[in-house]
Image (cartoon, rainbow, N blue to C red):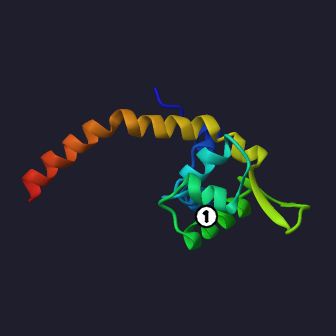
Amino acid sequence: MKDTSPVASALLQVDAPHRELLDQVLDKWSLQVLDVLCGTNLRFNELRRAVPAIGQKSLTACLRRLERNGMIERVVLQSRPVAVEYRIAPVGNTLNELVDALLRWTTENMPEVQRARERFDAVEG
């Protein structure tokens, strides 16, 4: 039976701040960037090579969003010329298993999703 106690309901609410955070963490590029950064620290151009489909402007916006939400850290390296490295932040690291599970789920279920899309399109088309 579903728990409807006030404590359980409060923990499972998805109000505007929750939706905004989920939108920003689960958007088109964030999952890929988080997945890459969970494995290693990278500079901007290394990240672009690791996620080749992302453009410079989109990557910049994604990194700023993730940094603002505390998922990643931007670290200025003391080198000549000065360089910046991105790394997963502690709260972002808590997403590691979840991101892996979501990516694994999409891989495992994509054939069934594709079949469902084809059935739907055949009826609607």
Q: Nearer the viewer, residue 68 or 79?
A: 79
Residue furthest top as drawn: 1
Q: Residue at x 61, y 46 (%)?
A: 36
Callout 1 crowding tier (Cα within 10 Å): few <14, some 14–19, many ≥20: many
Residue furthest bottom as drawn: 57
Q: Which residue is mark 1?
A: 62
Q: Nearer the viewer, residue 24 or 34?
A: 34
Task: Identify the secondary structure beneath mark 1.
Answer: helix
Q: Nearer the viewer, residue 6 or 37?
A: 37
User: Where residue 116 sits: x, y (%)?
Assistant: 20, 43
Q: Residue at x 59, y 65 (%)?
A: 59
Residue 38 in sight from this viewpoint: yes
Q: Is residue 121 left or right of residue 114?
A: left
Q: Quadrant of residue 78?
A: bottom right
User: Where residue 104 sits: x, y (%)?
Assistant: 46, 34
Question: How many numbered marks, from 0 up?
Answer: 1
Q: Amino acid at mark 1?
A: Cys
Residue furthest right as drawn: 78
User: Where residue 8 sits: x, y (%)?
Assistant: 61, 37
Q: Nearer the viewer, residue 26 or 79?
A: 79
Residue 4 in sight from this viewpoint: no
Question: Vertical placement of 19 versus 92: above or below?
Answer: below
Q: Quadrant of residue 74?
A: bottom right
Q: Residue at x 63, y 69 (%)?
A: 60
Question: Vertical placement of 2 versus 33: above or below?
Answer: above
